[in-house]
Image (tube, rainbow, N blue to C red):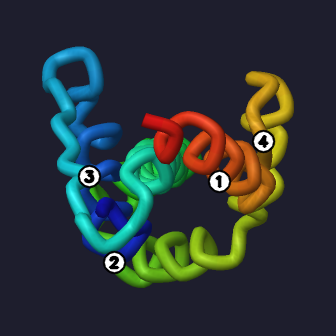
Amino acid sequence: VIKLDDELKELATELVRCDALQKVFIGLDFFDASINRIAAWVIGMRNMQKALLYGLLTPNKELKEAQDKADFTKVLQGLEEIKTLPFGDVWAEFCQRNEVPVDGKWYPIVKDYEKDVLFKR
């Protein structure tokens, strides 16, 4: 299951930074036999979306300008500032605008589906 860790955020940020979002296909693997498959899919997809959002919110242009000027202190400062930006608020707004549940509010929907559909076969 795809987890929102530093590695995933760096990968997504690099895709954004290199303007590669229209040039690559993102393939994800969600198999984990120990948990609900639908939940694994939802968690993985949402985490990939969060990572891409994180990359899109990164001030890549400003960081590149500082790097091109060899102002590595400014690059470090910018990268550290990003860590405390209100990422969660932007994610919540994204979910609201797309009429999908925020954070753990999707889980009861999946749990009910699992109970009602998957186990009645």
Could you give the CA–CA distance between mark 2 and mark 4, rounded to whole angstroms? 40 Å
Q: Marks 1 and 4, how far apart in space? A: 14 Å
Q: Which residue is mark 3?
A: 30
Of marks 2 and 4, which one's residue comes earlier in the chain? 2
Q: Nearer the viewer, mark 1 or mark 3?
A: 1
State the separation of the CA atoms marked 3 and 2: 38 Å
Precedes in sequence: disc 3 or disc 2: 3
Q: CA distance from mark 1 to mark 3?
A: 17 Å
| Three-letter amino acid code at the position of disc 4 | Pro
Q: Amino acid at mark 1?
A: Lys
Q: Earlier in the sequence, mark 1 or mark 3?
A: 3
Upstream in sequence: badge 3 or badge 4: 3
How far is disc 1 from disc 2 in space, using C-alphas? 48 Å
**Residue at which label 2 appears:** 72
User: Percent position (x, y) of residue 108?
Assistant: 75, 54
Q: Secondary structure at mark 4?
A: loop
* Residue 111 rendering spot, x and y as whole percentages: 65, 53
Helix, strand or loop at disc 2?
helix
> At 59% from the left edge and 69% from the top edge, which residue is drawn?
82
Q: What crowding class fits label 2: few (fewer than 14 Cα within 10 Å), some (14-19), or many (20 or more)?
A: few
Nearest to the observer: residue 49 or residue 99: 99
Q: Is residue 23 above or below residue 73?
A: above
* Residue under label 1: 111
Q: Report which residue position mark 4 lands on.
A: 101
Choose between 95 and 42: the one closer to the eye: 42
**Could you give the CA–CA distance between mark 3 and mark 4, rounded to whole angstroms?**
20 Å
